[in-house]
Amino acid sequence: MFRNNVKGKTTMKVQKLLTFASVGALMCGLSAAASAADWKYAHEEYEGDVQDVFAYAFKEHIEENSDHTVTVYRFGELGESDDIMEQTQNGILQFVNQSPGFTGSLIPEAQIFFIPYLLPTDEETVLEFFDESKAINEMFPELYAEQGLELLKMYPEGEMVVTADEPITSPEDFENKKIRTMTNPLLSETYNAFGATPTPLPWGEVYGGLQTGIIDGQENPIFWIESGGLYEVSPHLTFTGHGWFTTAMMANQDFYEGLPEEDQALVQEAADAAYDHTIEHIQGLAEESLEKIKEDSDEVTVTRLDEEQIQAFRERAPQVEEEFLEMTGEKGEELLEQFKADLEAVSED
């Protein structure tokens, strides 16, 4: 039976109608977005998911410390990820939260997060990296600014986990498997390297695609696998240790630069407060989500690759790194060098 009601999901046809209606309503009365007392903020996830937690912490700080209000739009209310980015660049939305998986087509260097085995699996080290990294906190804002976006925060959501129609323990197990990817060239290259057939698909079609066999598997943080009910139609979970799902919260740059200094400071403070709250929220979240999945389904299997199994995948990572450098040129090379230096610094602590 098709899961029609996962966190308020509707069929795609109805969802599109709702999207057009929502965007139409949103555009009414937005003749001066920069001076609007009600700021619009869209993200890619459902109620209670990590981006939603961040958005509502941001909203709470703004509303407690000013006369401004923030209206939050969740996944599907204004369209898919590409739609909300376009609306932000056009000034219809003031704020957007979008993962580099989608931003990569706009900012190729953002695809760095899809080089497998670049980030460690240790949560504490990853969190320290995001706090202290020059690549994250100094270089990325400049890249986003070139696209008219004010990068306010980058943050990790969780370790990536692969789900499939059978357990995966080696690259050979990926042969002839159609693995759903975001519309991200480097992520496709990763699954090519792993031996699978990467299959880009909009998020709204993933559950049905898994159910009907259009795709054989996908990757996401464990909380998203639980939240979206993906384990119901893709019950074999594999912890490959190859990366973390990362996301970014940003503002339309014209809007941000048009704010009075006190409002700019308020936005920065709200982003910092939301970041701190969200980092606390994600600690232990993966374990909680996995327990919920196990309690809900007897069909789920969990495979954690050992070092020898991981090495078979890690050996295929250099070709993805080479593809990243080919896509991004000198800027990408500088970013990757700094990224690695920042990771080495936190790993030595």
Image (cartoon, helix red, strand yellow):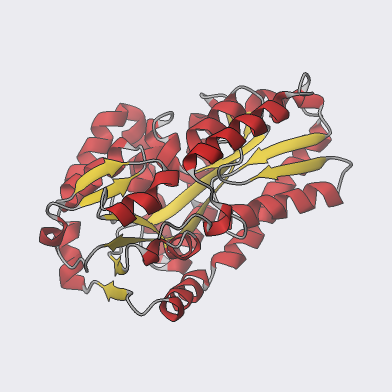
Residue sticking out furthest to the front: 1
x then y, percent, for residue 172: 10, 59
Q: Give the camera-side residue of 13 and 257.
A: 13
Instruction: Name the residue at the right extreme.
Output: 67
**Residue 51 x, y percent position in the rendering:** 58, 52
Classify residue 41 by image quadrant.
top right
Compare residues 281 and 80 and report the one nearer the observer: 80
Q: Quadrant of residue 346?
A: bottom left
Left or right for 318, reference 333: left
Decide: is 234 above or below 334.
below
Q: Is residue 335 left or right of residue 8?
A: left
Asked whether the viewer can see residue 56, the reply is yes
Residue at position x 40%, y 45% from top? Answer: 205
Q: Quadrant of the N terminus?
A: bottom left
Q: Quadrant of the C terminus?
A: bottom left
Tally of numbered discs: 0
Q: Nearer the viewer, residue 96 or 156?
A: 96
Q: Position of residue 334 (x, y in %)?
A: 35, 35
Residue at image location 39% in from the left, 53% down from the top: 207
Q: Which picture quadrant has residue 3?
A: bottom left
Q: Tell me if 321 is positioned left or right of 77 in this view.
A: left
Question: Is residue 258 visible from the viewing direction of this image?
Answer: no
Q: Residue at x 51, y 24 (%)?
A: 146
**Residue at (67% x, 48% y) in the render:** 271
Residue 339 lies, in percent from the top left, at 38, 47
In the rendered image, the residue lying farthest to the top is 31
